């Protein structure tokens, strides 16, 4: 049972990988957009920061779930 809990916690913690990839892609696309239209820099930055915050929140939720699995089921 302990190994199954560890696997579940590991899978929950993998949300950080998805968030990191998503933030990297979003930053890349934002840099391209700013290079194409420098006058829209402010609006692009606002949208980028909002998207990064939402992606990071998803990673934090996964981390919290992993900790809860370990503490409450372990």
Image (cartoon, rainbow, N blue to C red):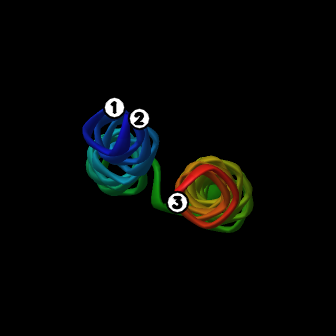
Q: Is residue 17 above or below residue 45?
A: above
Q: Position of residue 67 (x, y in %)?
A: 57, 65
- In the image, taking residue 47 as reference, residue 70 lies left or right, namely left
Tell me if label 2 and label 1 are in contact, CB under 8 Å.
yes
- In the image, taking residue 57 as reference, residue 9 lies left or right, namely left
- In the image, taking residue 21 as reference, residue 16 lies left or right, namely right
- 30 vs 59, nearest the viewer: 59
CA separation, marks 2 and 1? 6 Å
Q: Is residue 28 visible?
A: yes
Secondary structure category for the residue under label 3 = helix
Q: Which residue occupies 70% across, 50% down?
A: 54
Q: Give the mark nearer the N terminus: 3 vs 2.
A: 2
**Number of marks present in the image shown:** 3
Residue 39 quadrant: bottom right
Q: Is residue 44 above or below residue 22?
A: below
Mark 1 neighbour density, 10 Å: few (under 14) some (14–19) many (20 or more): few
Residue 8's label in the rendered image is 2
Q: Position of residue 30 (x, y in %)?
A: 41, 50
Q: Give the mark nearer the N terminus: 1 vs 3.
A: 1
Q: Nearer the viewer, mark 2 or mark 1?
A: 1
């Amino acid at each position: 049972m302990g190994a199954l809990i560890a696997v579940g916690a590991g899978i929950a913690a993998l949300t950080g990988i998805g968030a990191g990839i998503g933030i990297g892609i979003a930053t890349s696309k934002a840099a391209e957009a700013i290079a194409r239209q420098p006058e829209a820099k402010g609006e692009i930055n606002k949208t980028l920061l909002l998207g990064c915050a939402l992606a990071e929140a998803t990673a934090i939720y996964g981390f919290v779930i992993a900790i809860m699995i370990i503490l409450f089921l372990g």
